[in-house]
Amino acid sequence: MTFNQAGENKISELKFIVDQNVGKLAKWLRIMGYDTLFFDSGDDSRMVARALAEGRVILSRDTGIMKRRLITSGRLKAILINSYEPEQQMQQLIDTLNLDCQFRPFTLCLECNQPLVERSPDQVKDRVPPHVFQTQHQYMECPACHRIYWRGTHWEAMTRRLQRFMNKTTDLEK
Ligand SMILES: [Zn+2]
């Protein structure tokens, strides 16, 4: 079996822009560490221009966008998401792009898409609930919204769900 290093690199550089009709995908992709913009202005042309300028893959349920020349010609990559249901949308993406659920977990703010900065327990002591402070030793902070992240139960649950998507994909390939 040959290991395609170039292909691997390409996948790790994937960046996305998600249309408001598939907005929930932004959070999932950010959990995995994929740079993902949420586009909510409703103006398709601006979304397409931004995707082109920043090299982002467009994710949308809008068939109209897929008919644009930039996309049909292959200059701009876009994926038409089939399902209304967020988990199925995520499954489609993982299957189509061979996404890595363990890509860079816990590196981006789920709200602002900003790279998180590591913080020591002392630095966050007064900003997290006491029970969290007693049990968690690794913290990250968003430089934009100053939200503090830690690997708590919510994060673990989401990671487990992602892992399930991935396992399903592997099962299909067998
Ligand atoms: Zn933030």
Image (cartoon, helix red, strand yellow):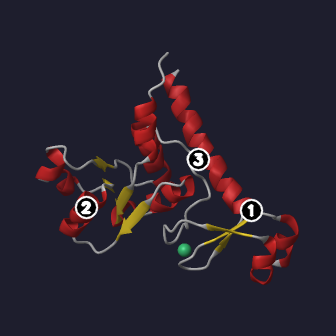
Seen as rendered, the residue at the extreme bottom is 126
In the displayed structure, does residue 131 sit left or right of residue 1?
right
Between 4 and 63, the one nearer to me in the picture:
4
Rounded to the nearest angstrom, the CA distance separating label 3 from label 2 is 30 Å
Which corner quadrant of the image does residue 140 belong to?
A: bottom right
Rendered image: mark on residue 53: 2
Between 56 and 18, the one nearer to me in the picture:
56
Tag 1: amino acid: Gly
In the displayed structure, does residue 133 sit left or right of residue 167?
right
Residue at 61% x, 41% y is 164
Residue corresponding to mark 1: 152
Residue corresponding to mark 3: 162
Mark 2 residue element: helix
Image quarter where ligand 1 lies: bottom right
Percent position of residue 96, x then y = 39, 38
Residue at 59% x, 67% y is 116
Rendered image: mark on residue 45: none
Tag 2: amino acid: Ala
Compared with residue 166, is residue 156 higher up or lower down, i.e. above or below? below
